[in-house]
């Protein structure tokens, strides 16, 4: 990519002001210099990064529009969100530094564009794709690359989006809501009438988790700080615990499932909060695989209680379960704040405070940023 294509936000604003020998297309101002090395068909706008660092690291830049394989589709993205992997991949700081850098890139990031959740429209399909056509509204996941105009995706990681659900609502759902669904259902084996505790009930995962646990007909206790009590009750929690005031792990109440969306309480404390056959489902700790190993070798404090970890996966069936819940009015996305893509740095900074109530939404509106 030539330097001509690299435009910081400031430089882009400069271009907008100067308006020398250029023209506007889709609301974007194109200078002649930029046109030398770009064409609309082959290039797209993206928020990129090329080294690990702080939230300020992103550059608005023209990059190649992803090419698709025969079994892939190209999605024009309208909406996305921020998730934990965005922070790991941007900062390069992860729980298992060495191991994770194999994934993110040892010295420099392997990926140029972050973003996992997508909601948008299909613009192109590969020769072997039969179930999606251009124009279909979809939502789901990509393996990074969502904070751009277009991303390539596997149809199995997407679902056709119900017309009644907005891109905004759908764009914040995939990773967090799937994590909660798969954590509670697959790892927790959730059943009607169980007692479920959602630790971090006001988080992205937690707000979906409370609603999913209610959908399964359980009695839900949500744990958050007092300022978030109303929202946690509004989304269906039967009981509320303010963690700043009560050490609920020392109390007598026992749960069938503890769904941990925070990861700050030691395991030995959780064992006391579980019924004899209870399950501790870990979503909050990055050390999920180690916890899984621990459960297999048998932590004796847990005895018959189970420590469960899980790997969230994108799949059409589960995305459809989630959107059916939304369509029936049984679940909604709680959006704390919505940022235009040009303010991605601010969005990262806000998410890193770990105070988000629900989700941070990213509006993919490159047309409006110039
Ligand atoms: N997002 C994902 O896709 C994803 C996927 C898999 C796993 N995870 C893991 O799941 C966890 C949740 O992720 P997220 O994106 O949903 O988080 P998040 O939205 O950033 O979580 C922020 C929320 O956590 C609450 N919180 C912070 N400390 C708390 C505590 N000690 N007790 C109870 N609540 C507390 C905050 O409420 P207060 O202001 O009231 O404290 C705030 O509402 C993370 O540990 C993440 O690594 C995330």
Image: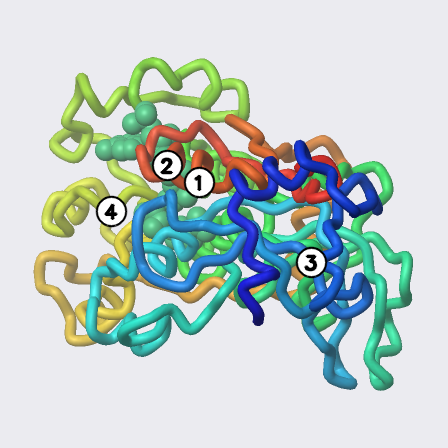
- Nearer the viewer's eye, disc 4 or disc 1? 1
Q: Is mark 4 within 8 Å of ligand 1?
A: yes
- Residue at 85% across, 63% down: 123
Q: Secondary structure at mark 1?
A: helix
Residue 201 is at least partly visible in this image: no
Q: CA distance from mark 2 to mark 1?
A: 6 Å
Residue under numbered circle 4: 263
**SS at badge 4:** loop
Q: Give left or right: position of 30 versus 175.
A: right
State which tag comes first along the sequence, 1 or 3: 3
- Residue at (77, 71) in percent of width and height: 73
Q: Residues within 10 Å of mark 1 (few under 14, many from 20)?
A: some
**Residue 11 visible in image:** yes
**Mark-to-mark CA distance, 4 and 2:** 20 Å
Pointer 2 and pointer 1: residues touching (CB < 8 Å)? Answer: yes
Is 342 on the left or on the right of 100, as rendered?
Answer: right
**Mark 3 CB near ligand 1 (8 Å cut):** no
**What residue does disc 3 label?**
34
Query: For mark 1, what is the residue?
Result: 345
Q: Earlier in the sequence, mark 4 or mark 1?
A: 4
Q: Which mark is residue 349?
A: 2
């Amino acid at each position: 990519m030539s330097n001509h294509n690299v435009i910081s936000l400031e430089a882009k604003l400069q271009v907008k002001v100067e308006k020398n020998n250029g023209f506007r297309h889709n609301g974007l101002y194109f200078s002649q210099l930029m046109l030398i090395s770009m064409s609309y068909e082959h290039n797209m706008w993206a928020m990129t990064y090329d080294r690990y660092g702080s939230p300020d690291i992103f550059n608005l830049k023209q990059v190649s529009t992803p090419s698709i394989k025969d079994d892939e589709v190209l999605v024009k993205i309208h909406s996305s969100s921020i998730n934990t992997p965005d922070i790991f991949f941007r900062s390069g700081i992860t729980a298992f530094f060495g191991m994770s850098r194999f994934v993110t890139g040892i010295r420099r990031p392997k990926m140029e564009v972050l973003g996992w959740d997508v909601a948008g429209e299909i613009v192109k399909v590969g020769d072997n794709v039969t179930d999606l056509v251009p124009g279909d509204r979809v939502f789901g996941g990509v393996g990074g690359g969502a904070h751009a105009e277009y991303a390539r995706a596997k149809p199995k990681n997407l679902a056709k989006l119900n017309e009644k659900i907005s891109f905004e609502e759908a764009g914040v759902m995939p990773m967090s809501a799937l994590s909660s669904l798969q954590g509670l259902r697959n790892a927790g084996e959730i059943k009607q009438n169980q007692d479920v505790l959602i630790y971090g009930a006001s988080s992205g995962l937690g707000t979906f988790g409370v609603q999913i646990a209610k959908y399964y007909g359980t009695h839900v206790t949500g744990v958050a700080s007092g300022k978030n009590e109303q929202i946690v009750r509004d989304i269906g929690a039967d009981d509320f615990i303010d963690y700043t005031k009560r050490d609920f792990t020392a109390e007598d109440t026992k749960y069938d499932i503890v769904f941990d969306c925070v990861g700050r309480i030691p395991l030995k404390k959780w064992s006391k909060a579980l019924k004899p056959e209870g399950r501790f489902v870990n979503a909050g700790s990055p050390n999920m695989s180690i916890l899984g190993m621990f459960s297999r070798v048998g932590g004796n404090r847990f005895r018959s209680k189970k420590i469960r970890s899980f790997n969230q996966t994108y799949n059409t069936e589960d995305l459809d379960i989630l959107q059916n819940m939304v369509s029936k009015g049984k679940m909604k996305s709680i959006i704390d704040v919505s940022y235009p893509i040009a303010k991605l740095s601010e969005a990262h900074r806000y998410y890193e405070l770990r105070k988000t109530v629900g989700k941070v939404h990213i509006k993919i509106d490159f047309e409006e940023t110039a």
